[in-house]
Amino acid sequence: MLNKEAPKGENKKEAKGQRTEFQLRPRQEGTTTVIQVARTAKVVKGGKRFGFRALVAVGDGNGKVGVAIGKANQVQFAVSKAEFHARKSAVKFPVVNNTIPHEIIGRYGSAAVWMKPAAPGTGVIAGAGVRLILEAAGIKDILAKSLGSTNACNLAYAAMEALKQLKSKDSVLARRGKVKEAAVPAAPKIGEAAAS
């Protein structure tokens, strides 16, 4: 016969290990943009176990942006993990007149993203995922096009590969051992030197 006086919790087995919950961190500077949240399912003996995958972009609005994926059993924890990893993997790239300095193609897996600088007032002309990354980075005028796979994660990483390859004019000249003409003072003419 069952003991009706026993509390409900006594008949349950206790967990063998301590379960640690992912701690939410206080928000830091910069904008956090959730690009995509997808629900994942794992089929196990008792049915399906659901989880979440979040793709997040974090940018400071001044040429620095990071993208990462976070996975957890709850959307909030998945976004928090992705934000943490995105801040760690952020890259800095040159911004010239609110656009990129030159045309570039970034590839990741079967996804490819083409980017081209645009005139002031053009706006951000790009697909959903790439647009959010560029806006988080502070780009206001740009043309972008997806050339390969439409997978959101691969497109985001392809956009990041393109941004990593960007170089400013000054850095290219310095690497080639050339100096900008404006930086070198003009030599005085012979008549001017004698007059002074």
Image: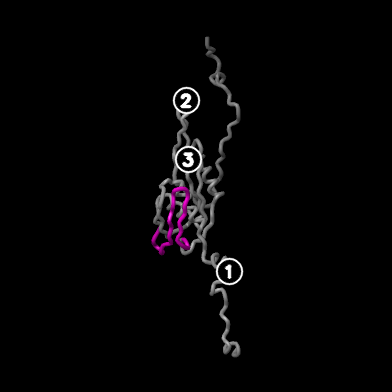
Front of the two marks 3 and 1: 1
Q: Are marks 3 and 1 in contact (CB under 8 Å)?
A: no
Q: What segment is highlighted magenta in the picture?
A: 100-123
Q: Is residue 181 above or below residue 17?
A: below
Query: What amino acid does circle 1 point to?
Result: Gly
Instruction: Indicate the position of residue 159 as horizontal and vertical percent values.
Output: 46, 53
Query: What amino acid does circle 3 point to?
Result: Arg
Secondary structure under badge 3? strand
Q: CA distance from mark 3 to mark 1?
A: 47 Å
Query: What amino acid does circle 2 point to?
Result: Gly
Residue 53 circle label: 3
Quarter-of-image position of residue 47: top left
Q: CA distance from mark 3 to mark 2?
A: 22 Å
Q: Earlier in the sequence, mark 3 or mark 1?
A: 3
Q: Is residue 138 left or right of residue 13?
A: left
Residue 156 circle label: none
Quarter-of-image position of residue 14: top right
How many residues crowd around disc 1 within 10 Å: few (fewer than 14), some, or many (20 or more)?
A: few
- Residue at 56%, 44% in the rendered image: 25
Residue 46 circle label: 2
